[in-house]
Image (cartoon, helix red, strand yellow):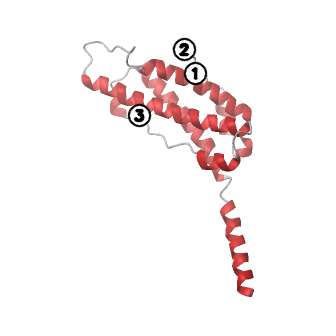
Amino acid sequence: MHGDWRGARHCVSAIRAMGTHADISQAIIEALYEEALMLADDVRATFDLSHNHLPAHENDFARIALSVEGLRTTTRMMHALAWLLNRRAYFRGEMSEFQLRRHGTLPPDRPADPDNLDYLSPRIRELIGVSEMLHARIARLDQAWRDSFEMRPAAVLRLRERLDRAVGEI
């Protein structure tokens, strides 16, 4: 494999300690982005079916499992990378907070099918698990960041009530 995704978990404790979007620093995003790039390269190499020759004795179920889980894993990685690229653009001033809130949502994960995992090698199962953990970490960051905006609709409602009262007095 190309990268060392097994040792690329250096951000875990910092991420677990985060509570609000103010805690999501550019350094954390950059570290996660670097980790995600290494992992994505390993995912690409592992699931590149033109180079992944299953032994002739492998059954069709193993080939289907490899294809399905390869698609899920690469999709998961592309979603994670897109989320991280949006954050990088935001920190660089290339996106506004409004644009980030509108277009920067991390899609939900589709975890691996345990039945498919039974057909895959331990190394591939571990790679899938690492990609799921990365997605889960980013999903926690995304949720914490979005939770910090929950109070904003209340402010809009208060403004609307004030406008209704003011119009009613006229």
Characterize the local packing of mark 2: few (<14), some (14-19) or many (20 or more) Cα atoms within 10 angstroms. few
Estimate the x, y position of residue 1 in percent, counting from the top left.
Answer: 51, 14
Estimate the x, y position of residue 114 in percent, counting from the top left.
Answer: 37, 33
SS of the residue under disc 1: helix
Q: Amino acid under label 3?
A: Ala
Direction from residue 1 to residue 11 in the image, left or right = right
Estimate the x, y position of residue 7 in percent, counting from the top left.
Answer: 60, 20
Estimate the x, y position of residue 19 in percent, counting from the top left.
Answer: 69, 46
First along the sequence among labels 3 and 2: 2
Q: Is residue 27 above or below residue 21?
A: above
Q: Nearer the viewer, residue 6 or 1?
A: 1
Characterize the local packing of mark 1: few (<14), some (14-19) or many (20 or more) Cα atoms within 10 angstroms. some
Q: Residue at x 45, y 30 (%)?
A: 73
SS of the residue under disc 2: loop
| Disc 1 and disc 2 in contact, CB within 8 angstroms | yes
> Which residue was labeled with disc 3?
112
Q: Amino acid under label 1?
A: Met
Q: Quadrant of the C terminus?
A: bottom right
The picture quadrant where one finds residue 62 is: top left
The circle drawn on residue 38 is: 1
Separation of marks 1 and 3 at Cα, in angstroms = 20 Å
Q: Nearer the viewer, residue 86 or 140?
A: 86
> Which residue was labeled with disc 2?
2
Q: Residue at x 41, y 34 (%)?
A: 112
Characterize the local packing of mark 3: few (<14), some (14-19) or many (20 or more) Cα atoms within 10 angstroms. some
Q: Residue at x 69, y 76 (%)?
A: 161
| Disc 1 and disc 3 in contact, CB within 8 angstroms | no
Q: Amino acid under label 2?
A: His
SS of the residue under disc 3: loop
